[in-house]
Image (spheres, helix red, strand yellow):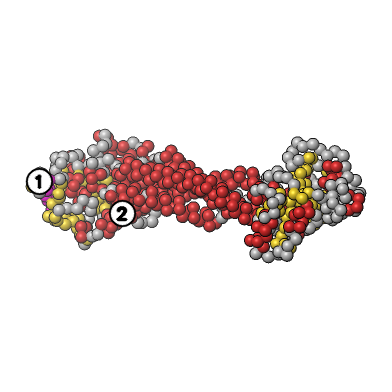
């Protein structure tokens, strides 16, 4: 279960207040709102990357921001998957190596079987040895999704996952994302402008300008 | 897939600058390795080549010249010295054995040394086949000379005037090989030995069958049958303390110079040490340049892939794990440079070794374990120092700013 309470996020001279969120295991949630409202910042706080000014993020029994930097990184590697708008694959590595990198960074042993399963699931079985920078954008985002799921996370955070995709690829990715999250039993939080995406998730939280003076 | 794979693949992404860094680093290490090896091996090779010759006594002049000419047989003969004068000078209780040597002829570039059978004592040499000479124009051949010239027992050879190839042949006289020596590792292996009486047989038409002092007196020999002049005397001391006393005593004679070969070689080493040092400085400069190139290359690479490093953090990598990526790249560079330097150093030492071998100085092209350990440690340290700034850059890469951009 993912819970956020009383989060206030400092951004420049502004302080952004986030609504409290509660997401049951396997549930899904869309974070919607205009650009600059703080969707990405909220995802980064939930991921344990951006420290909030105040408030708490709980992942199960664990309070994320009470952990040391290293322990939080370890928890993030093992329990949180992150999909970015611009994929952030490592160009120097093959598709398979990009997936295995998630295991290495989390301090887990290599798991070829899991990687092959995910690549098959994403329709990328034939591309496992191709270098990441030689994929189409749609393929890159599917690899990024497979990488985020590689360590069987409890929570999958997606930041505008369809933003860089054409309409057809975006539709295909939404289906794949929802199906994968359901099959993996992972809680899904998606920051999105895409109404189709938002409509496919269990609930939607609309972020409005919650800025107050810092 | 592990972090080494990641580091290596990152390195391959900038293979041009990586290859240049490796090449410069390898050149530096190879220079250092070769100089360090030579600094150890050449004095040892010289010492071995000298055999047991503790002193050379020859005409007045440079001690080093005398050693190079008559003990190491590298340079040309430098004049003659009256036999009886040296023979008197070496009558000393500190001298265990002394033997006259004369040179001036050769066979296909191999020197012919006119001497006495006691020369074997100086070099600790032993006959392998045949016997020692019993008169003029009989030759005993060192192992390396026999191999190079294809000489066997019974072989007949015509000598050439002078020590270099292309001199006039002494066509009217021939030497016959009567003995072959076992290898000693010293300069005697590369010489053809013959009796002192052969000098006048070859050069003045003395009958080789005239053996008695009475028969040869006045024909370039004194009443005792000794030659009137020789190139030098080689001597072996009976006590190490003699090295400090005897050469100085003999050198007081206005016509004689006595040289301690080991001392002269030490002086020569001191003379060439600045050259060695300069080459070593070049090696160190190459190493520093390679280190800087590695540091700049790594720093630039870290800047270029700051998003990748941030991504590693988001994927759960600890700061130390991210730092390892940068360190490992430096470590890979160091190891590739070190491996290449081994090949370059062996090639360089082989080249120098082949040149030195013509002077009978045998060196190994392989650096000692100690030298390799020093160079490896130094290179690794330089690599680690070069990776400090990139590591700091890598550790500073955090997810937020980069991924929000």
Residue at numbered disc 2: B319
Q: Chain of mark 2?
A: B
Q: Quadrant of residue A152?
A: bottom left
The image quarter in which residue A59 lies? bottom left
For image coordinates 49% across by 52% down, the residue present is: B375
> Which callout, 1 or 2, points to the residue nearer the camera?
2
Residue sitting at x 10%, y 44%: A208
**Other residues around mark 1 within 10 Å, as few (<14) / some (14–19) / many (≥20):** some
SS state under label 1: strand
Residue stretch in magenta: A13-20
> Is disc 2 on the same chain as disc 1?
no
Residue B202 placed where, x, y %? 84, 43
Q: Where is residue B354 drawn, in percent x and y?
A: 64, 45
Q: How many marks?
A: 2
Which one is nearer the viewer's eye here, B258 or B170?
Answer: B258
Q: Can I make out residue B319 in this image?
A: yes
Separation (CA) of disc 1 from disc 2: 32 Å
Percent across and percent down for residue A56 are: 16, 57
Say which residue label 1 marks.
A211
């Amino acid at each position: 279960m993912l819970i956020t309470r009383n989060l206030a996020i400092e951004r420049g001279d502004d302080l952004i207040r986030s609504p409290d969120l509660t997401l049951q295991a396997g549930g899904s949630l869309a974070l919607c709102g205009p650009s600059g409202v703080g969707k990405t910042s909220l995802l980064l706080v939930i991921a344990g990357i951006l420290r909030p000014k105040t408030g708490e993020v709980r992942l199960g029994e664990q309070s994320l921001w009470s952990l040391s930097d290293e322990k939080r990184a370890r928890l993030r590697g093992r329990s949180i998957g992150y999909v970015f708008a611009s994929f952030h694959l490592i160009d120097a590595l093959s598709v398979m190596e990009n997936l295995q990198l998630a295991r290495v960074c989390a301090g887990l042993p290599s798991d070829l079987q899991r990687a092959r399963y995910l690549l098959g699931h994403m329709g990328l079985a034939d591309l496992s040895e191709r270098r990441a920078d030689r994929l189409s954008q749609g393929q890159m985002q599917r690899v990024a999704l497979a990488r985020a799921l590689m360590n069987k996370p409890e929570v999958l955070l997606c930041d505008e996952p369809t933003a860089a995709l054409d309409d057809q690829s975006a539709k295909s990715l939404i289906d794949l994302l929802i199906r994968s999250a359901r099959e993996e039993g992972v809680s899904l939080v998606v920051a999105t402008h895409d109404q189709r995406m938002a409509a496919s998730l269990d609930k939607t939280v609309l972020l409005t300008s919650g800025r107050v003076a810092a | 897939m592990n972090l080494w794979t990641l580091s290596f693949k990152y390195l391959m992404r900038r293979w041009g600058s990586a290859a240049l860094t490796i090449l410069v680093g390898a050149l530096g290490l190879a220079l250092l390795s070769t100089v360090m090896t030579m600094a150890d091996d050449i004095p040892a090779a010289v010492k071995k080549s000298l055999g047991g010759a503790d002193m050379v006594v020859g005409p007045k002049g440079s001690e080093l010249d005398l050693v190079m000419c008559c003990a190491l047989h590298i340079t040309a003969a430098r004049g003659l010295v009256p036999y009886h004068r040296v023979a008197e000078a070496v009558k000393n209780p500190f001298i265990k054995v002394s033997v006259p040597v004369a040179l001036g002829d050769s066979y296909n570039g191999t020197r012919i040394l006119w001497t006495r059978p006691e020369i074997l004592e100086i070099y600790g040499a032993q006959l392998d086949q045949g016997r020692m000479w019993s008169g003029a124009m009989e030759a005993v051949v060192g192992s390396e000379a026999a191999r190079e010239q294809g000489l066997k027992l019974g072989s007949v050879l015509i000598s050439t005037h002078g020590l270099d190839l292309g001199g006039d042949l002494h066509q009217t006289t021939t030497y016959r090989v009567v003995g072959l020596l076992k290898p000693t590792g010293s300069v005697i292996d590369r010489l053809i030995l013959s009796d002192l009486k052969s000098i006048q047989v070859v050069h003045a038409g003395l009958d080789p069958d005239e053996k008695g002092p009475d028969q040869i007196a006045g024909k370039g020999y004194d009443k005792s049958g000794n030659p009137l002049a020789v190139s030098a005397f080689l001597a072996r001391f009976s006590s190490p303390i003699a090295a400090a006393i005897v050469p100085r005593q003999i050198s007081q004679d206005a016509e004689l110079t006595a040289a301690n070969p080991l001392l002269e070689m030490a002086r020569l080493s001191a003379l060439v040490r600045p050259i060695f040092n300069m080459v070593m400085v070049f090696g160190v400069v190459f190493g520093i340049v390679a280190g800087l190139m590695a540091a700049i290359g790594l720093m630039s690479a870290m800047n270029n892939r700051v998003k990748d490093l941030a991504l590693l953090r988001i994927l759960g990598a600890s700061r130390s794990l991210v730092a390892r990526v940068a360190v490992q790249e430096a470590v890979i560079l160091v190891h590739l440079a070190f491996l290449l330097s081994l090949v370059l150093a062996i090639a360089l030492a082989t080249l120098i070794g082949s040149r030195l071998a013509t002077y009978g100085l045998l060196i190994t092209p392989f650096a000692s374990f100690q030298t390799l350990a020093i160079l490896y440690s130094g290179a690794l340290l330089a690599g680690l120092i070069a990776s400090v700034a990139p590591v700091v850059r890598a550790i500073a890469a955090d997810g937020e700013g980069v991924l929000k951009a």
